[in-house]
Amino acid sequence: MNSPLQPTSRSTLGALVVGSAVIGWALVSTFYGDIPRLRWYMPVWAGVLALAEVFFGINLKSRIGRKKGAEPVDPIVAARALALAKASAYVGAALTGLWAGFAAYTASQWGHLISAKTDTVIAFVGVALSLALALAGLWLEQCCRVPGDSDEDY
């Protein structure tokens, strides 16, 4: 039986990272002087969401696996968790590329512009936290699987 919902494709996420990195670099190289100064807290929300998804995934996995003392999962909760997981993987991949494009440009301007130093560091933090969000989304998607599911079923 062919399932309508396929696991998130790693190659699609990779292409999204590369494509958004090119777009990010092009936009930043064109409009860098017009972009407001980056603040340290700008990429932090992606890390907070990634951390929340990891803890949610741990709880969900034990409930789906029917561990001792864990209450069963309402099917709508599992469906919403899967939607969140897929969205986080795609958004995390796109943001990883955008931050990488930003970092590539600002790193190339390191010796020319004073603000490029701080912006490069913030952009690299953005890359790391956005990548964490994408990976947390993939992991949460795995947590939504019922024990005994295999990739052959998809």
Image (spheres, helix red, strand yellow):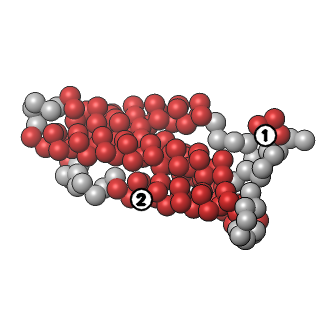
**If the image is split into quadrants, where does the N terminus sit?**
top right
Q: Secondary structure at mark 2?
A: helix
Q: Secondary structure at mark 1?
A: loop
Question: Who's the residue at 73% across and 65% down the image?
Answer: 68
Residue 6: x %, y % from top left: 73, 42
Identified at 34% across, 52% down, the residue is: 43
User: Quick one: 137 or 56, which is closer to the camera?
Assistant: 56
Is residue 109 among what the camera can see? yes
Q: Amino acid at mark 2?
A: Val
**Residue at image point 20% right, 48% down:** 34
| Distance between mark 1 and mark 2 Cα atoms | 30 Å
Residue nearer the viewer, 147 or 44: 147
Horizontal side, residue 151 vs residue 33: left or right: right
| Amino acid on which the number 1 mark rests in the picture | Ser
Mark 1 and mark 2 residues within 8 Å of each other at the beta carbon: no
Disc marking residue 48: 2
Q: Classify residue 20 as left or right of residue 67.
A: left
The first of marks 1 and 2 along the sequence is 2
Q: Is residue 25 above or below residue 51?
A: above
Q: Residues within 10 Å of mark 2 (few under 14, many from 20)?
A: some
The residue carrying mark 1 is 150
- Vertical order, 33 against 26 (above or below): below
With 54 as the anchor, is 8 left or right in this view?
right
Task: Provide residue 150's location: percent of width, then percent of height.
Answer: 78, 40
